[in-house]
Amino acid sequence: MRTFIAIEIPEEIKKEMVELQRRLRSSAVDASWPRPEGIHLTLKFLGEIPEAKVSEVQEALKSAASRSGAFRLEVEGVGTFPHPQNARVVWIGLSGDIDKLTALQTAIEDGMERIGMKREDRPFTPHLTLGRIKYIRSKEIWLKALESLKDIRLPGFDVTAVSLMKSELKRTGAVYTEVTRAELVR
């Protein structure tokens, strides 16, 4: 089973992100745009795990979540990886209780490592992916579009749980299903 750990994003924010995607579609880039149901905040990609390992992952996730209280995130500011002129990913940033988010992600990383999962090499950079850029046809148009969205603010949201998600690759795209949820202590 292909899996990852994520925070679900409220529907109202997903709808606003779709509007941002619509605005970016006309910015002289060829890109793939995640469907609203596929938008989430990934905390840890686990990859393929055997069904027999799921209960162990669930327990490690619950243990990590039990050390974190609920917190609030704000959604703001459009940016890119690695940089605007050669963007491969366009994202919207997160602010608010980033220290609590980072502590939760670290606890999850530590818990998964204890049960034999490989630790992520790259540092955790909290963001929500708006699109994956394949080709920039006009840097001028693209950079103007990014500039117009750099200070955008969407509604914030409370994080009260983390989810173990299953990812099934289908011809129509990836389908994500929640396997289990770990509530954050209030």
Image: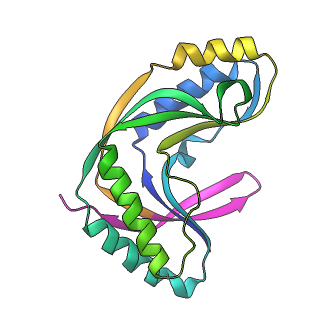
Characterize the magenta stretch by its predominant secondary structure: strand
Q: Where is residue 165 in the image (x, y as percent from the top left)?
A: 51, 64
Residue drawn 42% across the image and 62% down it? 163
Query: Camera-side residue: 56 or 18?
Result: 56
| Figure check: 90 above or below 159 | above
Q: Is residue 95 left or right of residue 176?
A: left
Q: Looking at this rendering, what residue extends furthest in the bottom direction?
A: 52
Where is residue 184, by image quadrant? bottom left
Q: Is residue 50 left or right of residue 108?
A: right
Q: Position of residue 7 (x, y in %)?
A: 42, 53
Q: Where is residue 141 in the image (x, y as percent from the top left)?
A: 71, 12
Residue drawn 76% across the image and 18% down it? 28
Q: What stretch is highlighted in magenta?
A: 164-186
- The colour scheme used here is rainbow
Where is residue 114, by image quadrant? bottom left
Query: Camera-side residue: 170 or 5?
Result: 5
Residue drawn 56% across the image and 29% down it? 79
Residue drawn 73% across the image and 11% down it? 140
Q: Looking at this rendering, what residue extends furthest in the left direction?
A: 186
Q: In which quarter of the image is the N terminus?
A: bottom right
Q: In which quarter of the image is the C terminus?
A: bottom left
| Figure check: 54 above or below 145 | below
| Figure check: 70 above or below 132 | below
Q: Position of residue 91 (x, y in %)?
A: 56, 34
Q: Is residue 84 magenta?
A: no
Q: Is residue 178 magenta?
A: yes
Where is residue 50, by image quadrant? bottom right
Q: In this view, does 161 lie to the left or right of 70?
A: right
Query: Camera-side residue: 93 or 86?
Result: 86
Report how many numbered discs are placed on residues in the image: 0
